[in-house]
Amino acid sequence: MCLAVPGRVLAVTEVDGVPTAEVDFGGVRKSVCLQYVPDAAVGEYVVVHVGFAIQRLDEQSAQRTLAEFERMGYLEEEFGAR
Amino acid sequence: MKYLDEFSNPELALRLVEQIHAVTTRPWAMMEVCGGQTHSIIRHGIDQLLPDGVEMIHGPGCPVCVTPLETIDKALAIASRPDVIFCSFGDMLRVPGSGRDLFSVKSAGADVRVVYSPLDALNLARENPDRPVVFFGIGFETTAPANAMTVYQARRLGVRNFSLLVSHVLVPPAIAAIMESPRCRVQAFLAAGHVCSVMGTGEYPALASKYGVPIVVTGFEPLDILEGIRQTVVQLEAGRHELQNAYPRAVRDEGNPAAKAMLRDVFEVTDRAWRGIGMIPDSGWRLSSRYREFDAEERFQVGDVRTSESPLCRSGEVLQGLLKPHECAAFGKECTPRNPLGATMVSSEGACAAYYAYRRLDVVHI
């Protein structure tokens, strides 16, 4: 449950007064709270844990990690069963 | 070499393994305090790629595993109430309480729901204003900001039917407790990367210095772990004991200031009993007085729970690195992921579950 997964910000809106992004995780899209990385912009990558962005990540590292997680089945474990 | 083929970049993995072998002159024991790292180490056989005598001890890094039995029993009591919607991360459903688990309570008719994020539970509360909605807020510093924000929003939006059953645990006091134990064999730590993404690295230099142990922050991808081990062995061999950040792409020294500010507002430090280990002073967070009205323990008056742990389960020794999972007599017999006696056999980040899923009996040398 401590998995934190990098994803790409597709769009930023506001939900209940809180910056919220639509984030793509290698094909799976989720709504992500940007309270803690409020200036994350469309196209940037953020590290997401239980629906919250906790840090930025550069694109190259993010894509490498996503490929690794995909290979190990972590993405399905994180998003598949829920 | 069979394990190396499973790395995303076998050449880099081999280079790191060779460097670790080249620098090692004697036995060392280091502990990882991150369930994701434990899972990765066992799954990829990283411990078996290391020089003879360099041992990975799997510490209490799985939040599901260390959540106190008493809190699990409180969760079961609250979830069993007919009006309650009880929300949890999926990992918690099979964690054994004193008699039952959340899964069996759900099968018996309780409204237990698995959510991806605590904000999903808050939304459920807004959609069901006539029913109490409780979220099981467990986890290390990585998860706490999400739960903090959810309670903050509940208060700000006036969602009074929402509450949080809180059992947060903190890594630095656990490191101190492990080092203070008379049976401690740990000579260095790998620190959890995403805990430090939130909290930064500021709490660790004093621990490294006080206990004379290198502490190296790293991630849980296999190559990150190998690099973390490499930096740790280099320090040990040189007689150094410093904080090093081997995961700078996701960890800044200062952590995430906005998350830390929210944590300071919503939580306060408290003593916490760790399952299998016992009470560790100042090792957890509970809701601060400003948010106490959202505390499920107060709202549902579940203070008088009586716990009883399986007499066969030795997960406490596993969590302290005194026993490897397969050395427990119940491992794979009375205790399996389907019928776990202890939490370390439940979570995919628990050492027993990882050994059960991946441990090969043949030791591979390169």
Image (tube, grey):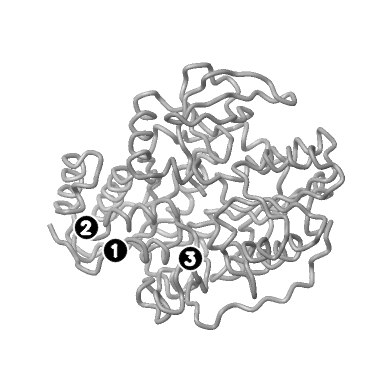
**Tag 3 near tag 1, CB within 8 Å:** no
Q: Which mark is residue B55?
A: 1
- Type of residue at label 2? Leu
Disc 1: CA contacts within 10 A as few (<14), some (14-19) or many (>=20): some
Pointer 2 local density, CA inside 10 Å: few below 14, some 14–19, many at least 20: many
**Image position of B98 (left or right of B348):** right
Crowding at mark 3 (Cα within 10 Å: few <14, some 14-19, many 20+): many
SS type, badge 3 = helix
Disc 3 and disc 1: Cα gap in Å? 20 Å
Q: Give the mark nearer the N terminus: 1 vs 2.
A: 2
Q: Mark 1 falls within which chain?
A: B
Q: Is residue B183 visible?
A: yes
Report the residue at 87% width, 45% height from top: B130
Residue B201 visible in the picture: no
Residue sitting nearer the eye, B120 or A4? B120
Image mark count: 3
Tell which circle, 3 or 2, labels the residue nearer the N-terminal end.
2
